[in-house]
Image: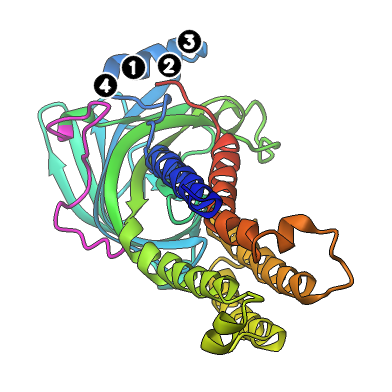
C-alpha cells in the first residue's frame, strides 16, 4: 500500500472515531439530569420546612394549571392559565382574600397594564373555601442559552403571599394532580402548542428569598427567611430545527472549503483540470467568509445580551479554517519557504488528509469544554 493510501486511511479512521465521540457528547449534552430540589409530595414539603427550622403561622395550599406558553424574546415568556388556593374555615379567616382580591403576587410579572388576573370561581367546600383566578401574565426571567441548540429551559412561576405582615408559606396542592412524582408532567395542558420546544418535566420547589431588605416591616420573616414557592416547567429545544438552520449550512461551507483545499497542487495536469491558482482559493475563502459572517450575525441577534453560546464556537472555528486554508495555499505556492515540508510533502498531502480530523477534533474539544461548564447535579 502506498504512503498516500496509508495516510488517507488513517485520516478516515480518525475521523470516524471523532464523529462517534462527538455524537456521544451531543447525546450527553442533550440529556436533562433533573433538579434535586423537586418536591414530589407533602412529605417532601414537610421535610424541607423542618430541615430549615420553619414553622409558619399559615400554610396555604396553592395550585396552578398552564394553558398556553409563548416566548416573546430572549428573556420574556407569556403564560396563561389558572391559579387556585384553599382557605380553611377558622384557620385562614384573617388572610382570606375578599371577592375581587388576589391571594398571591407574581413578582416577575411585567406589562401589568396589559395583563389579566381576575377571579374565576369561588367554591365552598366542607373544610373551607376554594378560590381560583384566571391569569394571563408576561413574566421576565433570566434564561441560559449557552448550550444552544442543546439547551433546556426552566420556565418558572414564582409566588409570593399577598400578606406581607404575616408568616405565610404557600404549599403545593398535590391533591389537585393525579401524579406529581419526579418524572411526571402535571399542571399543564397536554395539547399546548410548543413550537420548537417539547415538554421535559414539571415540578414544584422552594427557593429562599434573596431580598436584602425587610421592606420596612419590623421582623418581617416572610421576606427574610420563609421560602418562595416556584412551579417549574422544563422544556427541551427540538434539535432538528436548529440543526437544519445552522449546522447544515456550516457543514456545506466546510465541505466547499475542503474542496478548495483539494485543488491545491503543483501537478500541471491537475492545475489545468481544476484551474487552480492562489487567487482562486483565497477568493473562495473570502466569499465563504461573508456567508459565515452573515449567518453568525443573524444567530447573535437572536441571543443579544447572552454570553457566547455553544453554536457560536463553530463559527469561530470556521473563521480559523478559512484563515488556515488561505495561509496554507499561500505558503504552498511560495517557493521562498521550502523548509515547510509538512505543507510541501507529496503535493500538500498532510494538510489535505488532516482537514477533517482537525475539524472534528476541534468540534469535540469545543463540545467537551461546554459540557465541563455545566453545573453538576446529583442523579
Of marks 3 and 1, which one's residue comes earlier in the chain? 1
Q: Which residues are magenta?
A: 176-196
Residue furthest right as drawn: 336
Q: Is residue 77 left or right of residue 97?
A: right
Label 2 vs label 1: CA separation? 6 Å
Q: Is residue 161 left or right of residue 265?
A: left
Of marks 3 and 4, which one's residue comes earlier in the chain? 4
Quadrant hosting residue 312: bottom right
Visible residue check, residue 144: no
Residue that label 3 marks: 51
Whether residue 228 is in magenta: the answer is: no
Q: Is residue 277 left or right of residue 233?
A: right
Of marks 2 and 4, which one's residue comes earlier in the chain? 4
Quadrant hosting residue 16: top left
Which quadrant is the C terminus positioned in? Answer: top left
Residue that label 4 marks: 41
The image shows residue 105 at horizontal and vertical percentages of: 44, 48
Q: Residue at x 28, y 19 (%)?
A: 42
The image shows residue 4 at horizontal and vertical percentages of: 53, 54
Q: Are marks 2 and 1 in contact (CB under 8 Å)?
A: yes
Secondary structure found at label 2: helix
Label 3 vs label 4: CA separation? 16 Å
Residue that label 2 marks: 48
Amino acid at each position: 500500500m502506498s504512503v498516500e493510501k496509508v495516510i488517507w486511511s488513517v485520516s478516515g479512521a480518525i475521523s470516524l472515531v471523532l464523529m462517534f465521540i462527538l455524537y456521544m457528547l451531543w447525546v450527553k449534552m442533550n440529556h436533562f439530569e433533573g433538579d434535586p430540589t423537586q418536591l414530589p409530595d407533602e412529605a417532601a414539603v414537610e421535610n424541607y420546612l423542618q430541615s430549615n427550622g420553619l414553622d409558619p403561622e399559615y400554610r396555604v395550599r396553592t395550585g396552578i394549571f398552564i394553558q398556553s406558553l409563548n416566548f416573546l424574546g430572549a428573556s420574556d415568556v407569556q403564560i396563561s392559565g389558572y391559579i387556585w388556593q384553599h382557605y380553611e374555615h377558622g384557620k385562614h379567616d384573617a388572610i382570606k382574600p375578599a371577592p375581587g382580591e388576589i391571594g398571591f403576587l407574581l413578582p416577575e410579572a411585567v406589562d401589568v397594564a396589559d395583563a389579566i388576573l381576575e377571579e374565576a370561581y369561588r367554591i365552598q367546600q366542607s373544610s373551607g373555601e376554594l378560590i381560583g383566578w384566571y391569569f394571563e401574565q408576561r413574566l421576565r426571567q433570566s434564561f441560559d442559552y449557552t448550550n444552544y441548540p442543546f439547551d433546556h429551559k426552566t420556565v418558572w412561576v414564582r409566588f409570593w403571599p399577598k400578606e406581607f405582615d404575616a408568616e405565610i408559606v404557600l404549599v403545593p396542592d398535590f391533591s389537585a394532580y393525579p401524579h406529581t412524582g419526579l418524572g411526571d408532567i402535571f399542571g399543564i395542558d397536554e395539547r399546548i402548542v410548543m413550537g420548537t420546544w417539547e415538554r421535559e418535566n414539571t415540578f414544584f420547589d422552594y427557593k429562599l428569598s434573596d431580598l436584602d431588605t425587610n421592606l420596612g416591616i419590623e421582623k418581617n420573616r416572610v421576606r427574610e427567611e420563609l421560602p418562595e414557592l416556584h412551579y417549574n416547567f422544563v422544556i427541551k429545544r427540538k434539535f432538528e430545527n436548529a440543526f437544519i438552520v445552522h449546522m447544515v449550512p456550516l457543514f456545506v461551507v466546510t465541505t466547499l472549503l475542503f474542496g478548495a483545499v483539494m485543488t491545491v497542487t503543483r501537478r500541471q495536469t491537475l492545475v489545468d483540470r481544476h484551474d487552480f491558482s492562489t487567487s482562486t482559493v483565497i477568493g473562495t475563502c473570502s466569499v465563504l467568509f461573508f456567508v459565515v459572517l452573515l449567518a453568525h450575525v443573524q444567530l447573535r441577534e437572536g441571543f443579544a445580551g447572552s454570553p457566547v453560546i455553544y453554536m457560536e464556537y463553530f463559527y469561530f472555528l470556521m473563521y480559523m479554517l478559512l484563515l488556515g486554508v488561505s495561509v496554507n495555499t499561500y505558503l504552498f505556492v511560495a517557493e521562498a519557504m521550502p523548509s515547510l515540508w509538512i505543507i510541501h510533502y507529496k503535493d500538500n498531502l498532510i494538510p489535505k488528509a488532516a482537514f477533517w480530523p482537525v475539524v472534528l477534533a476541534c468540534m469535540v474539544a469545543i463540545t467537551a469544554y461546554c459540557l465541563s461548564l455545566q453545573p453538576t447535579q446529583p442523579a
